[in-house]
Amino acid sequence: MYPVHDVDAILMLAMSLASKRRPAELVEIIAAAELSQGAIPAETKLSDSFYRLSEYGLICAQGGGYALTPDAQQILSGHAKKAKSQERICDIKESLADFHLAGAHAIVLLTVEQIAAAIAEHQAAKKIPGKNLLVPKPKPAEDPNKRPWERSPYQSFATRRRKER
């Protein structure tokens, strides 16, 4: 596949996160892209990426959502699971560079307006607590008065004795 763009790898990684059990909706893909990358790519770049990846038979539309094809899943399975996002993106880009088109495939056309609406919906859903499960939960603030060696009130006597040994 030539040329390979960063957005293509980001989109494939986001779709692998969002469509584990069923085809993912566009909002879920946007949320997964933000989770893996830290930022949402531009609407025009996402639209072009959907077009390119569907043209090469790596993305398909199914039941109102979007899913990865078996070829795309094979590309994504070739890297380490504990690798960081940037390492995964580089591995995916290398695999995409070696991928060759086989046959004609249905093209997924998404307009910039559809993607912009999905981004706006994701931004609105982020503000509602408990609505979006793909966004990491904020960590609770540490109590500055609590000393690290203080025991928890729920810790039993037997547990304390085991820790002392």
Image (cartoon, rainbow, N blue to C red):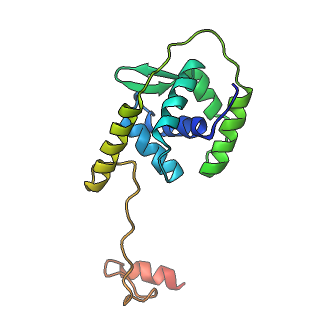
> Where the C terminus falls, by quadrant?
bottom right
Tell me which residue sits at (47%, 50%) in the image: 35
Q: Residue at 58% of width from left, 35% of height from top? A: 8
Q: Nearer the viewer, residue 66 or 162?
A: 66
Single out the residue that lies furthest toward the top: 103
User: In the image, 161: left or right of 86?
Assistant: left
Q: Quadrant of residue 115?
A: top left
123 lies above or below 75:
below
Q: Is residue 78 left or right of residue 106?
A: right
Return the x and y of residue 127 as percentages of the image width and height.
28, 55
Q: Is residue 25 visible?
A: no
Residue displayed at 29% across by 48% down: 125
Give the total of numbered labels.
0
- The N terminus sits in image quarter: top right
Give percent across and percent down for residue 112: 41, 33
Q: Residue 84, can we see it?
A: yes
Is 145 in front, or is 130? 130
Give the image location of residue 156, x and y in percent: 35, 79
Residue 157 lies left or right of residue 11; in this view the side is left
- Residue at 32% x, 48% y is 132
Out of 104 and 48, give the one closest to the viewer: 48
Residue 35, compared with residue 8, is above or below; it is below
Residue 72, percent from left and from top: 59, 27
Residue closer to the observer: 63 or 77: 63
